[in-house]
Structure formats: C-alpha cells, structure tokens
Image (cartoon, rainbow, N blue to C red):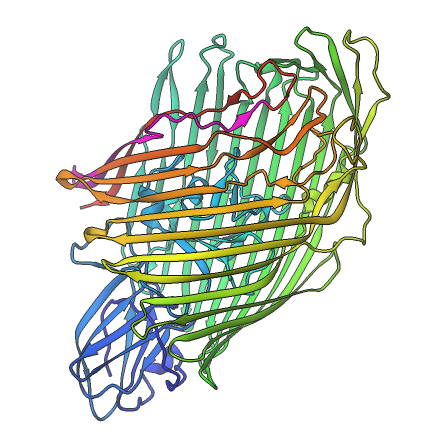
C-alpha cells in the first residue's frame, strides 16, 4: 500500500472501474493488482471533489477524477514505477515521481490537497494550471483568493464590488448585480452553502472581510437541480478555514487624515484575520473582523453642516471540528452593523432633509458532514438569518422638493425586520456501475421567511423652479404590516459518466411555497462530450426549467397603504384635476410562480500556447413574471395610479460570449471576455409608492440591458519584484425612461441611454521584510483615463438639469499596507 505526502488530485473514471471504498476502508481492503485507489482530502480532511489525477510511466498511463467524497481509482496499470500528478484549480499541485505498482496487489493513497494561498511559505510550490474538465457540465467562472484580494476594482475592501469581474455580471448604480439579464433578486446567493441575501427583497446586502474569502464562483447556466429559488444564476462565496499552522494578516490599519476647517479622520478601513488550530489534526478556527469609518466632506457647504460620517463592522468567525474520521462539523457566525448620519447630504439636499440610518444583519450556520458505511455521504445543515433597518429623518417639518434643491425634513420614517430559518439535507450515494457510472445525489430544503415593516409617511410638497406649488402628496393606510412565507423543495440528481468522453447530468426538483401554493416541477439536463481523446476540445449543452422564489417585498406593496397626488395650476393655487390615487393590489390565490427556461451550448478549446477559450450561446426565456400594470393604454394623459400585480411579464435574454485565459510563469495570467447580448421584456417599468410613475406598463429593454461588454483582468510581472495587476471594464450604457414634473411618463424604457462605461484600474505591489515581519505595499490608480462614468441622470423633461448626469466617479489614487505575518 502507498501513502503519499501532500498533493493535488483530479478524475477521469473509465467505465470498467469499481466502486470506491469509504475513506476508512481504503487502507484496510486488499486491492486487485494494477489498481491505484486515491482518497483526496484538503488540509482539514474535507473531501476534494473533481480533482484531476494522472499517472504516467514507461509501462502505461491512466487518469481519473475524484467523486463527491474525494475518491478515484485507476485500473489496469502494469507493474512498474509511475509519476503521479494531482491537480485542481485553486489548489497547489503536487507531483510524486516514484509511485511503485507491484504485480501482487494494488496500491492505495491518501492525498492531502492544499488550497492556494495568497501568501506562500515555500518557493517550490506548483500552481494547478487551468484545464478542460471532462465531467463539468455547468457554465461557470471563479475568482480565487488572489483575484479577490489583489485585483484592482472600485471598492477593494467590499466583496460585492468584485462580482462584476465575473463574465455576465453587471452592477447598477446601487452596486447590486445583474447576471445575464436578470434582476438582482433572481440570483441565488450562497455563503458556504447557505442562502445569505435579504429574506424579503432578496438583494445582496452582506459584508465580510475579503481576506477570509477563499473563492467566489458564479454558475450562469446549466446549474443542477440542487439549487433553488433563482433564475439568474448561483453566486457562491466560499470562506476559508485554519489549518495546523497559526497565521495572521492585517490590512489598512493606519487611518487617513483630511483637512476641512481643521484636521479630521477621513477614512479608516482596518481588517484582520487570524487562523490556526484549536487542536492540531482535529479542530481549527478562523476569525476575521473588519471595520470601516468614513467621513465625507462637501466643500460647497458651510462648516459644521458639510460632513457625512458613516461606520460599519463585519466580524466573521468559523470553526471546524472533526468529531470522528467520518464526521465533520462546521459552524460559522457573520455579523454586519452599519450606521450613517446625514445620509443623502449634497449641495442640493442640506442636512435637515437627510436621514440617519442604522442597519444590522447576521447569519448563523451549522453543517454536519457524515461519511456513511459503503461510501455514502450525508450532509445536514441549519442556518438562521436576520436583517434590521431603521431610517429616521431629522424632524417633522414639511418636506419640500424643488427642481434643484430640497428643504424641510424628509417625509418617511421606516423600521424594517426580516428573517430566514433554513434547513438542508443532502445524501450522496456510492457510485453505481450500470451502462457507465452513476453518481446519485438527493436533497431536501425547508425555509421560513418573515418580513415586517413600520412606515410613517408625512405629507410633502413638490414646487417648480419659480417656487409655485406643482403638487401636494399625502399618504393613507396602515403604518405597520407583515408578510411571511414557507418554502419547501426536494431534488434528485444523477451525474452519469456514460463513457470516458461523455457525461450526462439529468435531474428534477419539486418546489412549493405558502403564498403561491403550487407544486412546481423543474426538470434539467446537461451534457459534456470530449471531441478528442486528448481532451483538448469539449462540447457542452443543456436546458432546464428554473423557478424564482416568491419576492415577499414585491407582494407587500399592496400592504403599504395609498398615496394621493394633487396637481396644481401654473399659479400653484388651484388643483387641475381631482387627487390621483396610487395604490397597489393583487388577488390572493391567483398567482403562479415565475419561471425561466435557461438553455445554452458551448465549446471549450485548448489552443496552442496553453490558451484556453470558451465560446457560449445563452438563451433565457422568462414566463409568468410578476409585474404591476395599470389601466392606461397610452402614454399621453395617463394619471392612473391603480396598479395590479399580474403574472403576465415575459422576459428574453440572448447572449453570445467568448472568454480566453492565458497562463504565464510565476502564476501570472491574462483573462478576457466579450459578450454581445440583448435583455428585454414586455413589462420594462418598475413601479413603487415612494416615487410612482404615471404611465402604462410598456415593453422595452430591461434597466440593466448592456448590449456590448468587454472585460479583462490579470497579473503581469514588472521590474524588481513588482507585480502589475489590472482590470478593464467597457460596456454599453444602461437605458432609461423620461418623465415630466408630475412623474407622468413622456418616453418609455430605452428612450435614451447613459454614455458608454469605461474603467481601467491599475495597481502595483511590492513585498518586503521589516522588523521580522512580511509586509506588502500597494499603490494604484482607479479609472486611469478619468472617464466620467455617471450613476444617475435627471430624466425630468421639465427640469433645468434635464439629461444632466451625476454621481460621477473620476480618477482615484489608492494605497494599501498589509501585514502578512512573520518571515
């Protein structure tokens, strides 16, 4: 029997291979001659799936890829000495050059595969190169630890701003992301396997230290039935874990000083991470606190009334305990606290019109992984999530909104609570050999979602440039409301290796929730086929039905009361028409769950010079979408504010995408992607009570439609040990509609577009030793070309600033100091 040191693994099982034994049985059973059995685990003895294994020697060669519980076998090896190479992207590769196979019996190996780390203790480590995975059927891309920490992007301390580095992801003005034509709530957000977006709105709102993140992966299409509740895609954040060595990292622990009528702390973004063993070989921990303090000054405002202080803190704590060799227990706790005074301050909105905001969020999770007799794996998980938000204006004076400025106090006070309790169970069976190899996976999920809101809305006024009254706004209805839901689902999935070159992934899931009360059936199918035995060209295709989770916030609009708009004549003295009532409503028991048919096909090819390319076509057709409609049929003269929720929205997204990645020596590489797409809908307008649009629901491009996008990033060597990191994002501007002073629609979705967006970010970093520690000094420039990329536009045709763009981010110099531990 053979026991190997730390290495990396992979898999490519021939149909005649036998079922793998569980981890504890590999070393005890006698293996047939010519068989090499591997069990691949990471540093904390967690099974590594889909790692690639290759053995080569004068007597022959063989390949395999690890299954769900880290097993893989190569059979038919002649006696002799072989070289074993084990690899998986985002892990360090390892090579064992003297693996002996005897003629009497087979060999077994327990292989430890170490995650790639930004800080490497050894200089002789080997990075796993990219490769075409013959059994991968999903369309996906991944950012690893180094990409997240060292690539330059707009806010490098906030994980949310790294997501647009993934092809198919575009951010809106609030930094919420849209995956391949979908709205932000349609994406599934997972943190270490648990849902962690807002339970009510389903937006991504969480923060955590980027140092603690091991990878971010996005599955755009062909993702399997184990994922539920989103038609946009699956964005998974995997955080790290300690090992048997203590490590610590500190970043940005020196505050910046600014001068504005005296010296002040301008910004301070310290974050730290400590990892290590609780008990070597058995239990480990990770603690990663992060804090932020910002004080923004507006020089055009008087001293003492020109600052916006904000702060947040986001500690993450994790622990893993191996209760037994076949039982791994992992727990985590993430907390977010946030506060901001004078929120919304600008030269147009003085302090009395701003608000004070407080928010908190947390996620507590526990997962148990049990390796059962015979090779089955059982996963049980529980998580609890809670969100809190409180927005308070500065007083109760009447709010007055003009074309260029506001006065009084903001009109709305809100107190919001939402929560989720989530339970999951997954069972992975041992491989079954029948017409190839089958790996079956079954699962259950159960969620309870709660949402409550307390709103106090005061009347306010809208005035014209000459000061005359244009409209008076008042509200009526309940000040408190609640909306809850229960979701349940089950699935069955098969990964069927028909031959060494053909893999099929059929599956089906069933979903039910308390609001819609229908059982939704989601069949999905994908395949992967290697065109050549060498594995340099692969065809992939698939199609499936994907349902959205019910958006509790959208269905709560009818519970939020009514709005009355009274419009006045040019003198501001007489109403022009009777007050216009704005109200949202739907009929319970009549809704269906929105769904999307997501189909895609692609070809992956390894080009000369180790250039890996991927060509994909994606088609997403949405049906039965939720959208509010009113009784207007024409834009002209529409002052109807009665909106009814209907299941009649359809959406369509078509895209062609090419990606390429070229690896160089020293772990340098260049990644590039180009997407041409179109995202439109028969219902392109989004209505709400705070800022209603008086007009009919109209077809057009979705607000995040960006027909052309080029994305590139990577690491290149510079002189004297410096590395240059860069990112480039160029895309079409988003569409918008046009209204008049009374919020009446003048031109529908796509009437105009923002200017094209372009940003080039550069950063160079140097590592050095000082005072017995390793340090990293980084300097960078965001938006090198100083492109005036706007986030907002004045779309009021009656405004003196009509078509004026705002929230422009120009060129920014950045710096960072990191303490990376001892020498």
Vertical relation: 728 (above or below) 523: above
The image shows residue 301 at horizontal and vertical percentages of 50, 10
Assign the N terminus to one quadrant of the image.
Answer: bottom left
Say whether residue 481 is left or right of residue 277.
right
- In the rendered image, the residue lying farthest to the left is 720
Q: Answer whether residue 778 is magenta in the image.
A: yes
Confirm whether residue 274 shows in the render.
no
Residue placed at 70% from the left, 35% from the top? Answer: 687
Residue placed at 30% from the left, 39% from the top? Answer: 726
| Nearest to the observer: residue 443 or residue 27 | 443
Confirm whether residue 232 shows in the render.
yes
The image shows residue 578 at horizontal and vertical percentages of 86, 21
Vertical relation: 517 (above or below) 796: below
The image shows residue 558 at horizontal and vertical percentages of 77, 39
| Nearest to the observer: residue 31 or residue 600 | 600
Where are the magenta residues, as a range?
766-794
The image shows residue 783 at horizontal and vertical percentages of 36, 30
Vertical relation: 441 (above or below) 333: below
Q: Answer whether residue 175 is magenta in the image.
A: no
Vertical relation: 99 (above or below) 566: below
């Amino acid at each position: 029997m053979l026991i190997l040191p730390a290495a990396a693994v992979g898999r490519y099982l021939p149909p005649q291979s036998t079922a793998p034994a569980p981890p504890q049985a590999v070393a005890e059973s006698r293996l047939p001659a010519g068989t090499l059995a591997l069990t691949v685990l990471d540093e904390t003895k967690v099974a590594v799936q889909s790692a690639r294994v290759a053995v080569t020697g004068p007597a022959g060669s063989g390949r395999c890829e690890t299954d769900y519980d880290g097993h893989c076998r190569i059979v038919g090896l002649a006696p002799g000495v072989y070289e074993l190479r084990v690899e998986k992207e985002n892990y360090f590769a390892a090579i064992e050059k003297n693996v002996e196979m005897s003629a009497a019996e087979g060999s077994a190996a327990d292989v430890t595969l170490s995650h790639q780390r930004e800080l490497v203790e050894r200089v002789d480590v080997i990075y796993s190169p990219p490769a075409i995975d013959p059994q991968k059927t999903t369309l996906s891309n991944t950012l690893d630890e180094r990409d997240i920490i060292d690539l330059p992007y707009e806010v490098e301390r906030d994980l949310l701003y790294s997501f647009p580095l993934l092809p198919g992801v575009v951010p809106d003005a609030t930094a919420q992301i849209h995956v391949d034509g979908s709205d932000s709530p349609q994406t599934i957000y997972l943190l270490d396997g648990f849902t962690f977006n807002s339970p009510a709105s389903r937006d991504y709102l969480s923060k955590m230290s980027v140092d603690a993140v091991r990878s971010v992966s996005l599955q755009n299409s062909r993702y399997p039935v184990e994922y539920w509740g989103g038609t946009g895609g699956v964005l998974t954040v995997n955080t790290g874990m300690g090992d048997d060595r203590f490590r610590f990292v500190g970043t940005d622990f020196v505050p910046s000083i600014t001068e504005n009528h005296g010296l002040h702390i301008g910004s301070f973004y310290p974050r730290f991470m400590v990892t290590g063993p609780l008990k070597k070989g058995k239990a480990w921990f990770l603690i990663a606190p992060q804090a932020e303090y910002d004080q923004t000054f507006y020089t055009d405002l008087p001293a003492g009334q020109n600052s916006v202080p904000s702060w947040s803190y986001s500690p993450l704590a994790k622990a893993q305990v191996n209760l037994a060799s076949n039982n791994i227990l992992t727990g985590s706790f993430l907390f977010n606290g946030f506060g901001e005074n004078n929120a919304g301050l600008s030269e147009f909105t003085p302090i009395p019109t701003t608000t004070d905001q407080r928010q908190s969020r947390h996620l507590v999770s526990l997962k148990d992984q049990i390796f059962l007799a015979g090779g089955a794996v059982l996963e049980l998980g529980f998580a609890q999530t809670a969100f809190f938000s409180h927005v308070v204006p500065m007083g109760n004076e009447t709010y007055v909104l003009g074309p260029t400025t506001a006065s009084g106090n903001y009109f709305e006070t809100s107190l919001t609570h939402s929560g989720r309790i989530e339970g999951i169970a997954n069972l992975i069976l041992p491989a079954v050999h029948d017409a190839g190899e089958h790996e079956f996976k079954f699962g259950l999920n159960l969620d309870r979602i709660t949402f409550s809101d307390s709103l106090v809305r005061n009347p306010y006024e809208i005035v014209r440039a000459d000061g005359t009254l244009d409209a008076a706004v008042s509200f009526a209805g309940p000040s408190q409301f609640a909306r809850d839901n229960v979701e349940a689902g089950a699935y069955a999935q098969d990964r069927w290796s028909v031959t060494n070159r053909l893999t099929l992934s059929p599956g089906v899931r069933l979903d039910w929730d308390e609001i819609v009360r229908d059982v939704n059936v989601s069949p999905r199918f994908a395949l992967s086929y290697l065109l050549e035995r060498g594995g340099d060209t692969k065809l992939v295709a698939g199609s499936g039905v994907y349902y959205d989770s019910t958006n509790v916030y959208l269905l709560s609009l009818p519970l939020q009361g009514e709005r009355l708009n009274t419009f006045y004549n040019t003198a501001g003295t007489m109403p022009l028409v009777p007050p216009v009532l704005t109200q949202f409503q739907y009929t319970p028991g009549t809704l269906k769950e929105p769904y999307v048919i997501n189909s895609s096909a692609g070809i992956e090819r390894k080009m000369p010079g180790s250039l890996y390319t991927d060509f994909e076509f994606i088609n997403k057709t949405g049906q039965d979408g939720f959208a509010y409609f009113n009784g207007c049929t024409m834009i002209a003269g529409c002052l109807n504010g009665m909106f009814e929720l209907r299941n009649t929205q359809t959406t369509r997204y078509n895209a062609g995408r090419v990606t390429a990645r070229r690896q160089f020596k020293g772990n340098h590489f260049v990644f590039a992607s180009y997407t041409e797409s179109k995202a439109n809908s028969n219902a392109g307008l989004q209505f709400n009570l705070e800022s209603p649009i008086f007009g009919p629901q109209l077809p057009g491009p979705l607000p995040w439609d960006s027909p052309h996008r080029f994305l590139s990033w990577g690491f290149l060597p510079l002189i004297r040990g410096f590395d240059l990191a860069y990112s480039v994002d160029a895309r079409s501007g988003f569409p918008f509609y046009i209204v008049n002073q009374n919020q009446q629609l003048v031109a529908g979705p796509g009437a105009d577009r923002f200017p094209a967006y372009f940003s080039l970010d550069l950063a160079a970093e140097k590592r050095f030793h000082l005072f017995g520690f390793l340090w990293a000094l980084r300097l960078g420039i965001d938006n090198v070309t100083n492109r005036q990329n706007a986030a907002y536009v004045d779309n009021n045709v009656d405004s003196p600033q009509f078509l004026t763009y705002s929230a422009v981010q120009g060129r920014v110099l950045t710096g960072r100091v990191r303490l990376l531990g001892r020498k």
